[in-house]
Structures are given as structure tokens and as C-alpha cells.
Amino acid sequence: MTRLAPIPAALPATVPFVGPETIERRSGAAFAARLGANESGFGPSPLAARAMREAVGQVWQYADPTSFELTQALADHHGAAPENIMVGEGIDGLLGTLVRLTVAPGDAVVTSEGAYPTFNFHVAGSGGLLHKVPYRNDAEDPDALLDRTRAVSARLVYLANPDNPMGSWHPGAVIEAMLDRLPPECLLVLDEAYAEFAPASALPRIAPEDPRVIRMRTFSKAYGLAGARIGYAIGAPDLIAAFDRLRNHFGVNRIAQAGALAALQDQGWLAHVVAEVAAARDRIAKIGAANGLTPLPSATNFVALDAGGDGARSRALVAALEAEGVFVRMPGAAPLDRCIRISCGPGPELDILAEALPRALARL
Amino acid sequence: MTRLAPIPAALPATVPFVGPETIERRSGAAFAARLGANESGFGPSPLAARAMREAVGQVWQYADPTSFELTQALADHHGAAPENIMVGEGIDGLLGTLVRLTVAPGDAVVTSEGAYPTFNFHVAGSGGLLHKVPYRNDAEDPDALLDRTRAVSARLVYLANPDNPMGSWHPGAVIEAMLDRLPPECLLVLDEAYAEFAPASALPRIAPEDPRVIRMRTFSKAYGLAGARIGYAIGAPDLIAAFDRLRNHFGVNRIAQAGALAALQDQGWLAHVVAEVAAARDRIAKIGAANGLTPLPSATNFVALDAGGDGARSRALVAALEAEGVFVRMPGAAPLDRCIRISCGPGPELDILAEALPRALARL
């Protein structure tokens, strides 16, 4: 057997997420409603879809490793300079490179118990030491994160705003205040995967070149391009430039670049999706409430429904929904795991959810 | 400024390759012939192109992180088990994960002076110590690689067969003999990016589960899907499974998965491309010879042309060809850099090369 390097040799064989296709193969049945991965069943802009079909004609060419056109467009979109933007293979890929850039073996990193597991996966892969603080009122807790950051001299502190998996959010001013209290040796990793769904008041006013924070954005959620694997980071030029030292330079798909550029340019479609998602959130909340589950407020494209029990009950409910043909997920840690998490989708998929949920509850 | 971890902090800001789009932006003119990155201007199978256009309709969904269908099909294609196959974001992405899995800071790694720079980039990113041996007769030198591997107790030794950037190749039996002499603590990284173009005799008979070697294959070259970013590794089940500890699980594009599967299933198109490439190699050799450049034998989709001088002359010739609208590249190290490297392309692009080469030489 090949000898692994010490850090990977010590890692467990677990993976951050099991894909719905694996569950389908186990059960032998395809899901009737795919509401588990916070994908956008409303799809990408038709202009993005057209751009991707057209880009197939040039797929024999490697993509521009600088993602020049998209980077320019993103800079314009955010009032930033191209030097503030790094395009990568989704937030997962960008988080992986960021962690390798900043976390040496033994370095402390702070996150919340139950927050995004793929970030934790990358920290473990670099030999970093994860410190977790509890959520407070189903939201990530800036005070607790900062306290722990100081206590362990963390290199990175992770916070998603709006939050996944709970859907909660902080006013932008809270994030700004957090930055002002951040120890100088620590970088805030601000995951804004769901920012497009959030009220404007939830978006902090952060200068793109602010060296205290790096923001992560994606085309996977509101832009409907999860399968394209493309996202971007916004940060200080020196940190953005440092990505070139480690990243897979030719890692972004050429068709994805074309789709992302066209998607960005169709802000009308984005507004349409955001409105559809808001309506779907309301409907999921109503479906949950009609079945005795308590919906939590959400500024994302999903709703956490309190199933009124512990993690075991939620796991049983997720499994029962799977058996009814509905793919959903749930938070991985107590006390968040009293909830299940249902992604917003088009009306027909929510119709299926409405029929399946009482049957699933009856199975418990 | 964000403090980087020690290993990336010590890395230079260089990147493995400058993309042709960057050169085009500098010059303000688009290339008339794109013959520098060993892409396939013959394009992917029309069935693959159709599969990709159809897959755009599902791009709102994340790809199956296990690439289940494609992995099964690749296993069947190679007479292997799915446990021997790992699909990833091209050979670049797979090499990156492999190096992180096996190379700890300070570990020795052996390659050839002038061989694939992206492998070296990844080794540097893990803090490995690169040892380079010279080519011998414009081919990577198994004896020298093995001697150095033993001398420095290397963890990995890299060899491409057929070779990039020279196009040379070893009989499969030479690779098999190399494996038999490999120190037990070292893994052979056998880059077979160009295997589909090589004579059958150049392909070693290696059991998929052989723990001494991991083979890298790609859809970027003969299959014409460079911009899709998809490739695969073949190796022992324990090593293949270990990729799950570090890889970007959702890193492969959904459209790429569909394209790769359809491309693999159209072996007739592959045979067509291989025949076109063989004819293009002959034509590039003739164009070179007609202009006083000596073509080297090639088992790949490119031809190295000896420009009869040193690296400075080749660099000037590459620049002159760029000025004439033709994108080519050249080896990065002496004595290989007496050559320029021209990728096989369709007739019209080679017509442009035939017209541009004498004009470029006249510029020198």
C-alpha cells in the first residue's frame, strides 16, 4: 500500500456530503423532488443556458486560466478592481485553496458547531485544529466566534451570512462590527453563498480591498449553476494574488465561464429567481406548519423546519421523506439537528413535498 | 496583509503556463492558429457535444460527486474495477491531490529537467523537494530516474509516456521493467495524457490494482475536451480511495461528466481523431523540414521541431510565430529548448502555420 503523508494518513475516510444520486442508487428509485442541496430548480438564466450550449463548440480549448472577462465583469458588478476577484471551482474549491494558503499544521481555526462541513474538511486536510462554538438562537454567534478566536489565536474564523444550514442572518452592521473587533492576525472567511437572497440590510459594507476579510460568492445558488462549478472570492489584492501559488490554474470549465458571465449579465432573471424563492419559502413554511413543523425565518433559498424532536427524529423524517421520493437534508449537529432543511423549488416539486410530508410523518 | 502559511509564503508568484488569451490581450490580436496547448482542434465526438448541450438543462444540479456512471464505464473500458478509478478535474487536479496525499514537507520527489511543470508546481505547493535528472536522447531516462529515486529516497517519481514536451516514448516493456526496479517506498506517477495517440507497443501491461504505480489519463487531448476539465487516475484501490480524504468532492462539472461518458462511448470518433493527428504530425514535420527545422519523432498530438539553435533562438521563433498569429509553445529547459512544440490541428490551421513559419524565421 502507498504510504500517505502524515496529515492525510491521519484523516478519516468520511466525505462531506453524500450526493442524492448515491441515495437513489441505494434505494433503486429516482427522487420525485430534489430539495436537499439548495440547488435552484428555477434554473439558470435562459441566456446563460444559451451561452453554455454555444460554448460547447469551443470546449476543445482550455479555458482562460485568468477568467479575464468574467473577472472584469465581477469587478464591475461589485465596484471592485479585477485584482480583488479570484474565480475558482465553486466556493468549495476556493475554500480549499484559501485554507492551504493560510493554515499550517497545528494552526487554530474557528467555526460554529453545525456550520458548513466542507470548510472543516479542508481545515482537516491542512492539519489545522478546528475549534467550534455553539450557535445562539439558531444563528452563528459573532461574540462567541470572536472570543474563541482570541482565546486560541485563530488564523481563520468562518461565518456564513446568511447562514447555512439554518437560514438565519445578521444585519450587515453586525458583520462590520465583528471586523472591527477581529484580532489582526486572523482573517474572517465570510461565506456569502446565499447573499443574493438576503435583504440588502444583511449585506455588510466592506471595501473589496479590506485585508481583514475574504468573501466567498457562488453561481451555484441564485444563479442556478451548481453543476457548472464556478464561484469567486472578493478580497485584498495580495491575498487574491496568492491564490496563484497553489490553485489549479486551468481548473475552471470553459462552458462554466461562459454561463457565469451570461448569468451575471442577466440580473433580471436573478430578480425573478429571488422572487420565486421568496414565494417558495413561504409555501414551504406553510406546508411545514400545516404538518406540525415550525418554520424558521430564512434569508436563503431553503427553510429549516423544526421537527419538534431530537436529531434521531429528524434523521428518521429525512429517511421517511426519501422513501416518499423527496430528497432533503438536515443540520449535522445538536441542537440544530432538531430541524430538517428543505430547499426552495418550483411549484410542482413543492406539490410533491406537500403530499409526501404527511405520509413521511405517518411513517415515524 | 494576510499572513500566509510557511510553505505558500515561500513560493514564487509564478504560474505554470500563460494562457493564449493573455498573449492575445497583450498583442491586441487573436491568434489565427491555436497550436500551442496540445488541444484537439478536431474537436470532441459530435455525440459528446450533443450530450453536453443536453446536459445544460440539468446544470442547476450539482454533479454526482462519485462520477458513478463515468467511473463504471472507465472501469469497463480498462478492464478494471470502479475501485481502481478516480475521476477528477483533469490530470492537473488529480496530480495536485495525489501530491498532497503522498508528499510531506521535505519529502523528495524525482522528475526530469524540462518535464511537465504543473507537476513541479504541485510538489512545491506541498513543500516537497524536487530532484531533476536530464533527458537522454530527448526522452525521459528511466535509469537516471530510478538511480536518483534511490539516491534521494523519493516518495514519487514522475514520468510521462509518451513524453510531453518532446513527443518521445518508451516501449511498454521499459515501463514494466522500471516498475520492477522501483524502490518499494516510491510510487511511479505515470502520466499517460497522450496514450491514445501512441502505438500499442508503448502501453505497458500494468494491472489496475498494481500498488507501485498510478496512471493519469485525460479527456483533454485525444477526446477533445480540454475546456471541460475532466480526467481520471487508475491505481490501487487503497490509493484511489484515499483521494476522498482531500479532493474537492463536488469539483467535476456536470456537463463535463456527460461529455466524457459520451466521448468514451464513441471510440470510432477517437480512431478518426488519432488518424487525423497522425496525418497532421506528418504535415507539421514536412512544414518544419521545408523550413530547415528538424522534426523529432512523436507518439503524441504534437511535434517538437529542432530549431537548430539554443533556447534564445527558440524563444525568438515562438515570439515571431505569435506575431504572425500562430500560438505555439516550447520546452522550458535546455537542451530541450532548442525545439519548439507545435500541436496537431486541422488542415486550415496547418495551412496558416505553413505560411507563417517562413515569415517568422525571416523575422529572426
Image (spheres, coloured by chain):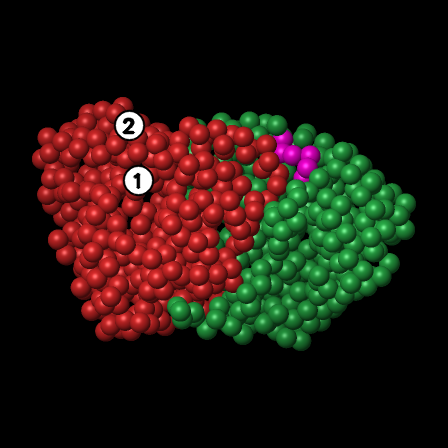
Chain colours: A green, B red
Which residue is under mark 1?
Answer: B38
- What is the span of residues highlighted in magenta in the rendered image? A39-45
* Residue A131 seen: yes
Query: Dot 2: few (<14), some (14–19), or many (≥20) neighbours within 10 Å?
Result: some
Q: Residue at x 11, y 34 (%)?
A: B289
Which residue is under mark 2?
Answer: B346
Q: Which secondary structure lies at badge 2?
A: loop
Q: Residue at x 53, y 69 (%)?
A: A11
> x and y percent of residue A242 in the render?
46, 56
Q: Residue at x 53, y 51 (%)?
A: B66
Q: Residue at x 76, y 45 (%)?
A: A324
Q: Quadrant of residue B341?
A: top left
| A169 on left or right of A246 | right
> x and y percent of residue B44 in the render?
39, 33
Q: Nearer the viewer, residue A195 or A364?
A: A364
Q: Is residue A103 above or below residue B168?
A: below
Q: Which amino acid does the dot numbered 1 rest on?
A: Asn
Q: Quadrant of residue B306?
A: top left
Tag 2 subunit: B
- Between discs 2 and 1, the one toward the N terminus: 1
Q: How many marks?
A: 2
Query: Dot 1: few (<14), some (14–19), or many (≥20) neighbours within 10 Å?
Result: many
